[in-house]
Amino acid sequence: MPVTLRIALRDWDYMTPLVLGDVSSTRLDIKVDRVSTLVSSLADDAAHDAAELSFSRYSQMRHDGDDRIVGMPNFIMRGFRHRCIITTKDSPIRTLSDLAGKNIGVTGWRDSGNTWTRAALRREGVGVEDAMWYAGRLTEAHPIADRLDGFGRPGRIEAAPGERPMVDLLLDGGLDAVFTPFMPKGFFDQESPLRQVLDDFRAAEVSYFHEVGYIPGMHLIGFKADIVKEHPWIMDELSELIDESQRLWLEKREKYADTTPWMIDELRRCAADLPPSWNISGLAENEAMIADFAEELYEQKIMPRLLTPAELFPWHAEAR
């Protein structure tokens, strides 16, 4: 009798084979709940046994000694961050170092993606103390919420003035740049007034990969500790299924590349720029990336103590 696993995930394309049942397991009956926002507290959520979690917020739980959730080092959301810094088309800002002394908007201070983006800036000499930061909603369509999350500092890290959407502030000149994991609606239109800060962000990202050896991970899967204790094999089983789902999806993307006119060229360039193991899962395989993220949380004063990969993923560290 397979174990039922109720899991909340965003609509990542490569999960499609898993959701449709093209990838399956005799040991697990997976029920995927497709969500637009992450579950706020998996430990208190009766509807799910596992869920997609922010790496930053999961790290906070580990720091606080909250062991109700066990993280699985399969980073289902990975991405370079250089592309995630936008400005106006008429802005003179063209490099990350140009952001020194500027007003920068972020969609959430402790968000994992924004932590990685600040890490990219820090590599170019622009630290937290070298800019003025405003946290707020990206557009009018996004909800008003506390995006400072306790990390505000007058004169350095503040809420967006009047809760105005950051895209509006950017267009009015109140902000010089905005960090965003997802581009605002209309960004890709030919008449859009916005652009990425870096004209050739791909070259910057390829260079970054060669320097650090990984693509940053933002989200992972968290399990309620009780189900892991009852079924110690469950994380490895799901991790293998996710890996297979991604492998199958990429294989189909190569076959059905005509869904986007130049997808075939993008696939060719990715194969040239990245090794086949760029999205590999596992603690040992991602230890350098995990350690660097923990260091950024500490250096950016999001965590008061430097955590180790073994502290963040104790279940997998003990299994080695």
Image (tube, rainbow, N blue to C red):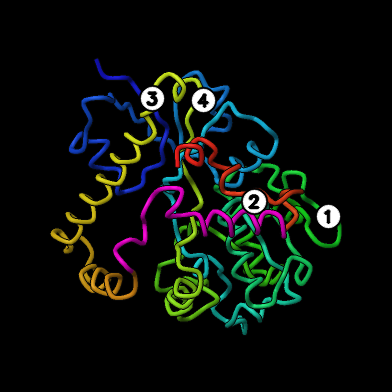
Between discs 3 and 2, the one toward the N terminus: 3
Camera-nearest label, 4 or 1 = 4
Indicate the position of residue 106 as horizontal and vertical percent values. 64, 58
Range of the magenta residues? Answer: 275-299
- The disc, 3 or 4, on the residue closer to the chain's N-terminal end is 3
Which corner quadrant holds the N terminus?
A: top left
Q: Would you say residue 190 is visible in this rendering?
A: yes
Q: Name the residue carrying label 1.
A: 153
| Number of the front mark, 1 or 3 | 3
State the separation of the CA atoms marked 2 and 1. 14 Å
Q: Indicate whether 120 appears above or below 300.
A: below
Label 2 Cα neighbours within 10 Å, binned few <14 / some 14-19 / many ≥20 = many
Q: Which residue is mark 2?
A: 108
Q: Label 4 crowding class (10 Å Cα cut-off): few <14, some 14-19, many 20+?
A: some
Mark 2 vs mark 4: give the one in front: 4
Residue 262 at x, y percent in the picture: 23, 71
Q: Residue at x 30, y 27 (%)?
A: 30
Q: Residue at x 40, y 73 (%)?
A: 190
- Say which mark, if any, is on residue 225: 4
Choose between 170 and 287: the one closer to the eye.
287
**Mark 3, residue position:** 6
Circle 1 packing at 10 Å, graded few (<14), some (14-19), many (20+), is few
